[in-house]
Structure formats: structure tokens, C-alpha cells
Amino acid sequence: DTTMKPFVQVICIWTLGALDAKSIKPQLVKALAYASDNENNFGGNIMDPRVCTHLPTVKEALSTLVGKL
């Protein structure tokens, strides 16, 4: 769902990896062509303890998942 924030999209992609979603691999490969390559973060402010946590872009997360399936 491209209307969701990139953070949420990455969490969903990671969830698909945990579910071993091999049956939808063809759809994921198609989605890879349109996946966002924009930087991703938690948002918030500098006092948030998660501020230094690296998150992949949606495209990186999806590419990693497709490679594992």
C-alpha cells in the first residue's frame, strides 16, 4: 500500500519474510520495480532513543526479501 508511510511498509515487508511468503514472490518481484528508494526513518525528534536506528528503504527491504524467498 503506497499510501502508508515507508516505515510501515518496511515492517510489513519484514513480516512477510517471517511468514516465508513464497507464494507471493512473483507479486513482490513486480512491486520491486515501483518500490520507493527514498530514505526511511522513525520520524520523531532528536531525543527519541531510536533516532540512530538504521532502516532500509522500501526497495532495499523488498529486494532482500525477494532474495531470501
Image (cartoon, helix red, strand yellow):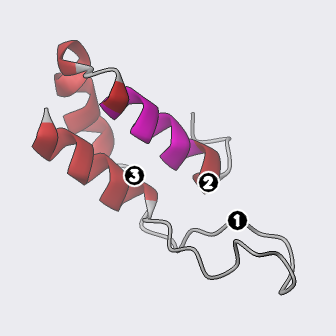
The label number, if any, that marks residue 68 in the structure image: none
Q: Could you give the CA–CA distance between mark 2 and mark 3, rounded to whole angstroms?
A: 13 Å
Q: Could you give the CA–CA distance between mark 2 and mark 1, rounded to whole angstroms?
A: 7 Å
x, y percentage for residue 46? 83, 87
Furthest residue toward top = 23
x, y percentage for residue 27? 26, 25
The amino acid pointed to by label 1 is Phe
The label number, if any, that marks residue 42 in the structure image: 1
The amino acid pointed to by label 3 is Ala
The amino acid pointed to by label 2 is Phe
Q: Residue at x 76, y 75 (%)?
A: 49
User: Which is more toward the observer, 50 or 69?
Assistant: 50
x, y percentage for residue 55? 50, 66
Mark 3 = which residue? 35
Residue 14 is one of the magenta-drawn residues: yes
Is residue 33 among the parts visible in the rendering? Answer: no
